[in-house]
Image (cartoon, rainbow, N blue to C red):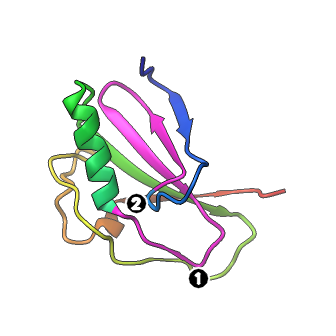
Amino acid sequence: PLQPNATWIFIAGRQGAFDAVHIVSKTHIRFVQVTAGGSHTFKLNILDSLMTSLALQGRTWSHLEFMVIRPSDDRRCFSLQTAQGRLQNYKRFDNEPWHRQDYRDNVQYGTLDWD
């Protein structure tokens, strides 16, 4: 069963969308990408497919967030590329709708010591 505050870490293969999924609550889900690369592209079509599959099993969330975590000592310029696909019918954690033109406005950023 899915439990709030459980974290799933996907490490097998290159699925191209995220590294971890954090079930924050019964209504909020967060997708996390940890990268030391100079850029990243979210494949929203993969996320949309996942969310649709889970909804068919009766597991739905109304709020969705992306978080990118980078090394704290990496001073290189980082860019998010144009997304592949689209997400609709979700709200951000601040209750704003997700149907904006540029998903990059919706991403939260954090840093982590790699030591």
Q: How far apart are labels 2 and 1 at the CA level?
A: 16 Å
Q: Residue at x 29, y 30 (%)?
A: 27
Farthest residue in the right direction? 115
Q: SS class of the residue under badge 2?
A: strand
Q: Quadrant of residue 50?
A: top left
Amino acid on which disc 2 is placed: Val
Q: Which residues are magenta?
A: 18-43
Mark 2 packing: few (<14 Cα in 10 Å), some, or many (20+)?
some
Residue furthest toward the front? 13
Query: Looking at the figure, which quarter contains the N terminus?
Result: top left
Which residue, given by chain and number where applicable, does mark 2 sit on?
107
Task: Write down the quadrant of residue 51 in the picture.
Answer: top left
Residue of label 1: 77
Residue 25: x percent and y percent? 38, 27
Quadrant containing the C terminus is: bottom right
User: Label for residue 6?
Assistant: none
In this rendering, does residue 45 appear at all?
yes
Q: Is residue 76 left or right of residue 105?
A: right
Dot 1 surroundings within 10 Å: few (below 14), some, or many (20 or more)? few
Residue at the image point whose x is 20% and y is 31% from the top: 56
Name the secondary structure under disc 1: loop
Q: Earlier in the sequence, mark 2 or mark 1?
A: 1
